[in-house]
Image: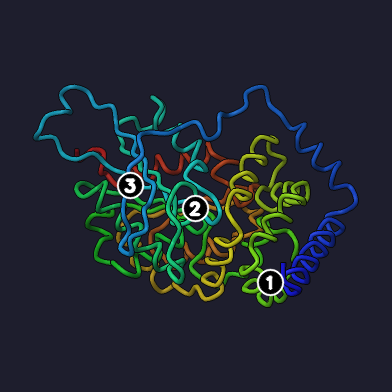
Amino acid sequence: MSVRGRVIGAVTVGAVGLAAAGAGVGVNRQRKRIARRAPDDVPAFGSLHSAPITVVAADGTPLHVEVDEPELPAKGRSRKAKPPLTVIFAHGYALELDCWHFQREHFRSARGRGQVRTVFYDQRSHGRSGRSPLGNATIEQLGSDLLAVMDAVAPEGPVVVVGHSMGGMTVVALAEQHPELFGDRVVGTALISTTAGGLEPSRILFPMVPAWGSAGPVGRTISTLARTHRIVDGVRKVGRDVALVATANLAFGDDVPGSYVEFVDRMLSATPFEVVAEFFPGFSSLDKFDAVEVLAKVPTVVICGTEDKLTSIGHSRKLQARIDGSTLLECHGAGHMVILERHSEVNGELDRLLAATGAEDAR
């Protein structure tokens, strides 16, 4: 290892040590308390899958896509039947398609919309998707990827797009690039725990690397650390207790079951720091609030937890104010991972969104 690499490694280790101190000398106790939050019924996170489909993005990046087809009655399988409503879910930064566990379970169940096609995919460089070429890890490219997925798996029929965190930014990027789709192919949108600009980047980064506490040091060190990403990945593993506590405190508002925290922490930890660093610059330059106005053409819901520490409730209120006719669901006490923490409320709001589109009745 070079002298420079050793220096960066030492600085990183020291920063993690400071983070641990900042979290309090009781980090180990906090971790144990989190582990004890165990309900009788532990969700089988990561168990819901269907046969994978590979969709190739415009720049050649392979995207991992899974489609849950509706179980239509025999009369609905006629060649003359209209294409079913398709709901496409775009996940957030350093997560993967499994984060939609409760939404996928809901739409598969009899209590959900069993007649709706649901599509889940891993964003480029995340989960099972291929790594993005250097320079293409941008919000704009994610918007293009969403269109590629839509064209490949839902070329016909109405589509509702649902985005959480960076996935919501993905939906906004699509709206900016192709406003003509909204009110035509896209008949509804849901923006969850997200924003279209004005974001403090360190809020997004902190759960992945709980070693920095302000945007200044993050901005100055992120590009350098990206070049020594293997060191950072190693330090993240060493400091996993700190990371777990950071995830509990920053991703959630309430004392959710420990299995929820561990599930999110596993997804964050599985995302290489090199990927984290590649996407990072796009958050500070994000400025697309003017683009969201086109979403007024279709039923749109905005959902956020009032204790969201990453994309605060103010962002969602601003989105709702800029989208005429949209509705805002504020989940009191919930944090950024509201799709897990308040899944029943989120699922109910998505049901109302699908009903508002009228697309199901039109089939």
Asked if disc 3 and disc 2 are in contact, CB closer than 8 Å, the reply is no
Hey, what amino acid is under mark 3?
Answer: Thr
Q: Is residue 40 above or below residue 300?
A: above
Residue 26 image point, x, y percent: 89, 47
Q: Is residue 201 visible?
A: no
Which tag, 3 or 2, sits closer to the chain's start?
3
Asked if disc 1 and disc 3 are in contact, CB closer than 8 Å, the reply is no
Hey, what amino acid is under mark 2?
Answer: His
Give me the disc on residue 54: 3
Q: Which residue is depicted at the point 77% across and 51% down?
A: 239
Q: Comparing marks 1 and 3, which lies closer to the viewer?
A: 3
Camera-nearest residue between 5 and 153: 5
Q: Residue furthest front?
A: 1
In the picture provided, is 83 more to the left or to the right than 224? left
Hey, what amino acid is under mark 1?
Answer: Val
Q: Determine the secondary structure under disc 3.
A: strand
